[in-house]
Image (tube, rainbow, N blue to C red):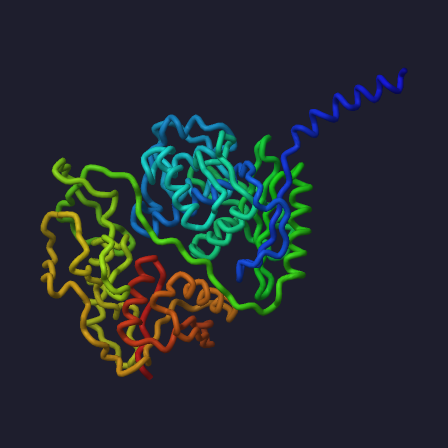
Amino acid sequence: MGLYIFTFIWLALLVPLSAMAAPYAALVMDARSGKVLHARNADTRLHPASLTKMMTLYIAFEAVQNGEISMDTLVKISSHAASEPPSKLGLRAGQKIKLRYLVRAAAVKSANDAATAIGEAIEGSEAAFARRMNRTAKALGMTRTSFRNAHGLTENGHLSTARDMSILGRHVIYDYPMYYNLFSRKTADAGVRQVAHTNRRLLSSYRGADGIKTGYTRAAGFNLVASAERGRERVIATVFGGRSTATRNAKVAELLDLGFKRAPTRVSFRAPRKPPYRGSGKKQTVVAEAPAPVAKPDQGAKSVRVASAAVTRSLRPQARRVQVPDTTLMVAGVQDDIENMLKQVQNVATAAPTQTGVAPAASVKPMVRPANVAVAAAAPRDVATPSRKAEVVTRLSTSGGRHWGINIGRYPSRFAAEKVLLKTALTETATLDGSLRKVIKGKRGFDANFMGLSRDTAELACKRLQARQVTCFMIGPG
């Protein structure tokens, strides 16, 4: 009789615990080719928890790169964002904080209030941001994912899969490599305080680990998308439904080991196709900028805004979808402040020409807008507006061949220079495709160069890179 009672009590305790256990799913991918090396329940739709923030941050990077918003934009925290449950940064309603600190808090601490504030800053509301998340997911090929919020807390219909989250992680790595280092920071300055990484244990214990994102809710269990790089190999491992942080990390380490064992040392690299930029769905009353003094490149010019209810436009001027060759369609988010900066730099170059045959960083000519790209009306500026005929770059190359190049910096080691060259080539394939990546050793370090370009292509590549705050100068023939 006592045995029956013991068995009944044991079952009564066991069944609720097993019912609470989240389903397990996993996928291992060779990040270089996208080839799946291991999968289990990889297409089962489950709760992603804070893995969701990878998409929130992906869209934030997209918005910054295309000029919708700046990392230095002051974001006003809404009562909705401030009231999000932990994990959180502790933001207060009405508080203003730079976007860069919100991004750090979401990437490193996985702060829910920061994630919601990012979504509201970009799209005006979390609901509108969730719609953009779903559009982006579809464009990335995440076929079994649906988002309902920016942070990943459990909500009806907010679901994804191990396969879809691995796809997203791969895009984060290769589409925005200039921001990927955020996910490997064990601590970060989030403006109001220092925050610690939620995955610092794996980052510290697994050789080559450099990201990406953890997630936990009761419904989801302990989730993780991790990536590690060893030599020429990079592997992504995704786990849903871990029972604890320790067991999840151990499983991910096991899967990463499996990935490195199965991944070939040499493989044909195929970067994921970056989805076309479609801009923000948010509209606002247009504002005209009064003439402003030209500021130094590191200061930024302030302008007085005068409201006008006559016209509406998106948050920042965007390129219309017109039939213009890629070589004449500039980065959509580059604004007048960057144009003025480039004009200033060229004036300096004209006043002090080089005699070495190598053009300095200031040799890049000012960017001009294509004639058939519409621009919001603005008050007259001190700089004369070029005529319509002069707005399209139509001149022929004067290089005499592909004898030009560009330099994107000097680095302490050959490996560091090669890594920067690869990441830059992945983000600027439109102009650097077919160029030769070349590292030149000097007395003070290793120069990272792209060679084998025409003069026009070198100019355009530097313009586009400088628009992304990447240091660049042209190298002339000889």
Horizontal and vertical percent for residue 444? Answer: 45, 72
Left or right: residue 448 compared with residue 14? left
Question: Would residue 228 be seen by someone viewing this image from the given angle?
Answer: no
Can you tell which quarter of the image residue 368 is in? bottom left
Q: Point out the image quarter for the N terminus.
A: top right
Question: Would residue 330 be seen by someone viewing this image from the given angle?
Answer: yes
Q: Point out the image quarter for the C terminus.
A: bottom left
Where is 435 relative to 129, above or below?
A: below
Horizontal and vertical percent for residue 437? Answer: 43, 73
Which residue is found at the position 11% from the left and 61% from the top?
388
Which residue is found at the position 16% from the left and 51% from the top?
293
Can you tell which quarter of the image residue 397 is in? bottom left
Q: Which residue is nearer to you in this view: 135 or 82? A: 135
Left or right: residue 359 compared with residue 390? right
Q: How many marks?
A: 0
Which residue is found at the position 11% from the left and 65% from the top?
389
Q: Which residue is nearer to you in this view: 123 or 372? A: 372
Where is 382 relative to 267, above or below?
A: above
Q: Which residue is nearer to you in this view: 196 or 37? A: 37
Horizontal and vertical percent for residue 122? Answer: 34, 40
Horizontal and vertical percent for residue 351? Answer: 19, 71
Which residue is found at the position 47% from the left and 61% from the top?
271
Where is 273 relative to 114, above or below?
A: below
Q: Residue furthest top?
A: 1
